[in-house]
Image: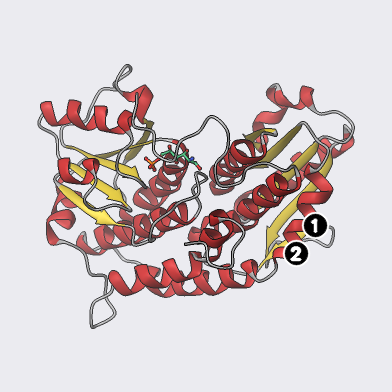
Amino acid sequence: EKGTYPHFMLKEIDEQPFVMRKIIQEYQDENDNIKLDSDIRQAMLDTDRVYIIAAGTSYHAGLVGKQFIEKIANVPVEVHIASEFSYNMPLLSEKPLFVFISQSGETADSRSVLVRIKELGHPALTITNVPGSTLSREANYTLHLHAGPEIAVASTKAYTAQIAVLAILAVDTAKAKGLDLDFDPLKELGIAASVMESLTDQKEVFEEIAKEYFTETRNAFYIGRGMDYFVVQEASLKLKEISYIQAEGFAGGELKHGTIALIESGTPVIALSTQESVNYSIRGNVQEVAARGAKTCIISIEGLEQESDTFVLPHVHELLTSLVSVVPMQLLAYYAALHRDCDVDKPRNLAKSVTVE
Ligand code: M6R
């Protein structure tokens, strides 16, 4: 039930800190180490390449997950859109492990890939919020998101839960491989949870930004680089699916290869900068669009901020910035939809779980 909330989406955005803490609790043993099914650990050790298969928001979480598994566990990863994979199957490695990411566990596009790869005899792990779901039952292994039921069509807490579980999986694999690590995901997730809470406590700030940037506009651009590029793709999906504003998330460096032609006087451009290595270059991209009349908004993070930034996120570990930077993006989409009188929880033409291919 929604309780005192006007919409499930807002309730689910607010639940994210609790979901993080639930995940920490569920994936922690009595010695504060990671607790994970030893068969899954073995499957991660046995594989020479992980193939992540997902759709929509879960695909966006997969893009972040690839960074974790490659950077932390040193295992190569490919991320594929489920509906594309079947028709355009890449050359597979010798020992592939398929990882299906799906909130509902019922997405038909992902299921058709699962059926296909099972015929080929490859192992599959499903990361889902619904352990009894089709994708969970038909895969060899399941990791549970513990996010609680997600009712709003726009996925919010499932996305952050997916990222948290992928970080835990990556670190568990790294430890099992004996790699040296100075990253404790359970501790860092706890810090991220507190930061998420401080953000959901400042809703009026994001409501104001949404009013200023999205009340009138027909279109909007989000830009980011590296990890932030993955988050802005999710940010734009959130905005378009519930507010019907035409939005796209672009890699900052790609603007000059075409997209910048779309910038007109007043076009909203929301930039995200949470990664030190690209802080300078994304700010350059912001200047390029501002010089062509764009109405720019920069969301940055403590340590990288500049005076003119619209909002500065509190510090979290650089690997986990997506967990907190997505929260303002979710709230911006929510308030944009609200102020445009859209049906926030049940946007037109969409279903919560897409059970047709
Ligand atoms: O249940 P799944 O995670 O497999 O669903 C995948 C997509 O249909 C889903 O994430 C969709 O993109 C959401 N409406 C996004 O908010």
The colour mode here is secondary structure
In this figure, which residue is indicated by the disc labeled 1?
Answer: 208
- Residue lying at the far top of the rendered structure: 87
Residue, x 39% and y 60% (percent of image)?
A: 147
Tell me if mark 2 has few (under 14), some (14-19) or many (20+) residues whose alpha carbon lies within 10 angstroms of its own: few
Q: Position of residue 185 (x, y in %)?
A: 39, 68
Quadrant of ligand 1 in image: top left
Residue, x 29% and y 57% (percent of image)?
A: 169
Q: Is residue 274 left or right of residue 207?
A: left
Q: Determine the CA span between mark 2 and mark 1.
A: 6 Å
Is the C terminus in the top left, top right, bottom left or bottom right quadrant?
top left
Q: Is mark 2 within 8 Å of ligand 1?
A: no
From what the image shows, is residue 284 above or below residue 159?
above
Under circle 2, the secondary element is helix
Q: Is residue 33 left or right of residue 304?
A: left
Under circle 1, the secondary element is helix
Three-letter code for the amino acid on which mark 1 is drawn: Glu
Relative depth, front residue between 199 and 251: 199
From what the image shows, is residue 166 above or below residue 245?
below
Tell me if mark 1 has few (under 14), some (14-19) or many (20+) residues whose alpha carbon lies within 10 angstroms of its own: some
* Residue 173 shows up from this direction: yes
From what the image shows, is residue 116 above or below residue 184?
above
Q: Position of residue 117 (x, y in %)?
A: 18, 29
In this figure, which residue is indicated by the disc labeled 2?
Answer: 204
Residue, x 31% and y 41% (percent of image)?
A: 76
Q: Quarter-wise, where is residue 239 in the image?
A: top right
Are circles 2 and 1 on residues that touch, CB within 8 Å? Answer: yes
Q: Position of residue 229 (x, y in %)?
A: 58, 42
From what the image shows, is residue 331 above or below residue 256?
below
Three-letter code for the amino acid on which mark 2 is drawn: Glu
Q: Quarter-wise, where is residue 100 in the image?
A: top left
